[in-house]
Image (tube, helix red, strand yellow):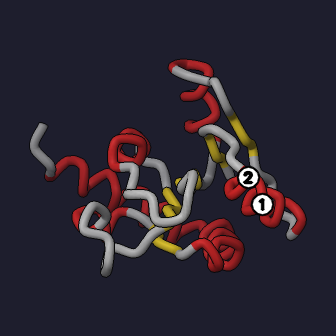
Amino acid sequence: MLFYGSLTDRRIVALDNLERNGLAVQTLFGAYGPDRDVWIARSRLVLNLHQVAGAPFEAVRVAYLLVNRCAVVAEGDPEWDDDARPWAEGVAWTLYDGLLATCQRWLAETSQRQRLADQGYQLMQQRSE
């Protein structure tokens, strides 16, 4: 599983919890372009985790992942986040407290994870530039 972005205290707590529970997490900060893209291509799952609680959905970051057929677990809930709602079908959603269980589930379910990545890709194909 891959996470890239700045490491705030909130993110560090979540990522440490994933690793303590046996998940292999590659964390990148300051990696861009081809350096980052190599890790994206190798990852079975990419985690989109807010810097601070209640932050808006990171559409640009997730769009790049979906157009590259990545399976994405994103913190949030499209039921109450208007920014996330258009992305509802292409992303696996979880609240902060459910990160571990959600990541474990998607890492274990290979065919479902591939289907999620394909749904995200199709979602992006339907969007206008």
On-image quarter of the C terminus: top left
Q: Percent x, y for residue 35? A: 62, 21
- CB atoms at circles 1 and 2 under 8 Å apart? yes
Picture layout, residue 104 above or below residue 14: below
Residue 51 numbered tag: none
- Which x, y percent locates residue 23? 80, 61
Q: Residue at x 80, y 54 (%)?
A: 24
Which amino acid does the dot numbered 1 rest on?
Val
Is residue 78 found left or right of 86 in the rendered image?
right
**Depth-wise, is mark 1 or mark 2 nearer the camera?**
2
Residue drawn at 64 percent across, 34 percent down: 39
Report which residue position mark 2 lands on: 9
Residue in the foreground of this view, choosing between 16 and 68: 16
The 10 Å Cα crowd at callout 2, few under 14, some 14 to 19, many 20 or more, is few
Q: Amino acid at mark 2?
A: Asp
Q: Quadrant of residue 37?
A: top right
